[in-house]
Image (spheres, coloured by chain):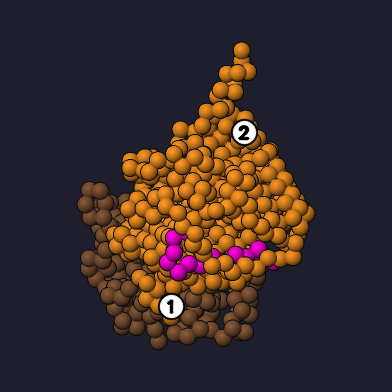
Chain colours: A orange, B brown
Amino acid sequence: MAAPVMEAVEALESHLHPTPSFAIDDHPYPKGQEEIWRFSPLRAMRALLTDAPSDACLTWAESYPEGVTTRVISTAEAQLMVAEAPIDRVSALAAARSGGAQVIEVPANAELTEPVSITLSGTGQHVWGHLVFSIGAHSSSTILLRHEGSASYATKVDVLVGDGARVNFVSIQDWDDDAVHGGHHSVLVGRDAQVRTVTVSLGGKVVRLAETAKFAGPGGSLEQFGLYFVDAGQHIEHRLFVDHNAPHTHSNVDYRGALQGEGARSVWIGDVLIRKVAENISTYESNKNLVLTDGCRADSVPNLEIETGEIEGAGHSSTTGRFDDEQLFYLRSRGISEAEARRLVVRGFFADIIRRIGVPEVEEHMMGAVERELSVTMGSYA
Amino acid sequence: MSTLSINDLRVEVATESGPKEILKGVNLTVNDGEVHAIMGPNGSGKSTLAYAIAGHPKYTITGGSVTLDGVELTELTVDERARAGLFLAMQYPIEVPGVSVANFLRTAKTALDGEAPKVRTWVKDVNAALDRLGLDPSFSARSLNEGFSGGEKKRNEIVQLELLNPKFAILDETDSGLDIDALRIVSEGVNRFAAQGDRGVLLITHYTRILNYIKPDFVHVFVNGRIVEEGGPELAENLEVEGYERFIKAAAAS
């Protein structure tokens, strides 16, 4: 009798998360009180939540290293080639209405020295999109997915990482001020695979990404880094869920954000579920928010659900605050002006994340972007 | 001729039960070429003196003055005081994650000089200063004070002292927590700085140990927020034998 009970326990979905599903009806139009929607600007996201057809596409600029292939699959085929079914209405609509998915494949055993680079840019259109990255077993690659321009963009992105593969998946949201971007990035970490994701959200009126990850077998390692810089009137939301559904897996989440200007709003949700089967795992999640001016709001909610005590370690931390007076005093006591000291602290705060991107010109570009953001409230860099 | 002059300095801090006076009228003059040691028991207010002069926001100056070559420091911001020629080596240097030692040093040097140091000579100067303090050149790539051992933090303060070369340096318990080798290396750095002849040093310490390596010209005993006795190096030797007991009793009785 014991076995069925165990199965029943394992079948339970975490109470924090809706059941993934391709059926749009499983994701009703939110009222705003739902756990997953209570922080989100529903009015600004209306186009992403409304089931209306659109054939529009973003403009693609791609650079694929030799060996990388790409093809389009049907919506039905795409449902069989995902890391996880859509977790919310935006991604369910994106998967259903995108007219199929674009698949980008890194072959097994490939050692890519150049990044797979895709830049998606918009000119104000409404787009449903679905991308599938299939990362072959034992390959090594960096994927750069950039978003620019203006759009109303609902997306489903799946990253299927084969056994033993090493991948660095970088997603940059560098939209114009009026863009609205929502969706679901899901990662399936293969057995013994090493996955790093870097999510950088700088521009856009609204960016709301659910980032989920789970494991296809034991031994996988997942690092997720994030950086966001939120200006007046901007809403940037990252909702992470790491599902430790296999033993001997490892995860580390580190998201850092800065907020400045009236109505700047960030939301970070960091959920980790350690299932009964997931013995000997370790996980840590951290979110730090630096509030640069009055009128900002940062919500930061880490959650750990632990169903087994047989783990190596699990922890989380969340801090939201203004500048550390002691840091500023120390720097200024060496003659560095207050504005310059603040700039140093913020750059230092983000430098740790930016260096994880692993593509020097993108790292430089991102430091420059942080610099420009800082000049909004701190004056231009002398 | 350069002078740091502290006159009837009064300082208070905010506490839960209201403001509390820590410095109760401090008078002290340090001329260039002089090394002064301030010695006192825990809680006497000697660190408060250092931080108040440097402009730490926690301390409120309620009376008196601090001038450096006639410039009233208490009316200046923290960074303006540094640019006026003041340096404070801290007892607990602060970690600044993501800011490399090299970047920090270059930024500070640029702020103090009003122009960026010449690239070629500067890197050489930094590496030489690190070497003198027994630190590897790779040290400059590390995040400022992050993960440094206690000894590395103190050495890094003296690297800054040598490279930024202020007119006056206040060293707040630079000797605390150092093993004997580190104490010797750090002391040599301070002595090199003082040996220039036109720099002033105010050495704040709880112990007499560092005075075996750095010879003060003047020793001041600091108890209960003010200087209670002054003398030459022999006063430190006296303290080594007798301790602070006599001064604490006298201060309590007065």
Q: How far across and how far down the image is residue B130, in percent?
A: 61, 71
In this view of the protein, can residue B150 be seen by the observer?
A: no
Magenta-drawn stretch, dominant element (helix, strand or loop)? strand
Q: How many marks?
A: 2
At horizontal 25% and vertical 48% (from top left) the residue drawn is B16
**Extreme residue in the top direction:** A1
Q: Quadrant of residue B230?
A: bottom left
At horizontal 40% and vertical 78% (from top left) the residue drawn is A380
Secondary structure of the residue carrying numbered label 2: loop
Q: How far across and how far down the image is residue B163, in percent?
A: 54, 77
In the rendered structure, does residue A121 fall within the stretch colored magenta?
A: yes
**Extreme residue in the right direction:** A109
Identity, as a three-letter code, of the amino acid under mark 1: Tyr
How far is mark 1 from mark 2, CA to CA? 49 Å
Please tell me the numbered disc located at residue B43: none
Q: How far across and how far down the image is residue A243, in percent?
A: 56, 39
Q: Which residue is mark 1?
A: A381
Please tell me the numbered disc located at residue A278: 2
Q: Nearer the viewer, residue B107 or B55?
A: B107
User: Do marks 1 and 2 share a subunit?
Assistant: yes
- Residue stretch rendered in magenta on the structure: A113-127
Q: Quadrant of the C terminus of chain B?
A: bottom left
At horizontal 68% and vertical 38% (from top left) the residue drawn is A217
Secondary structure of the residue carrying numbered label 1: loop
- Tell me: B48 left or right of A102: left
Q: Chain of mark 1?
A: A
In this view of the protein, can residue A89 be seen by the observer?
A: yes
Packing grade of label 1 (10 A; few <14, some 14-19, many >=20) is few
Circle 1 or circle 2, nearest the eye: 2
Q: Quadrant of the N terminus of chain B?
A: bottom left
Q: Chain of mark 2?
A: A
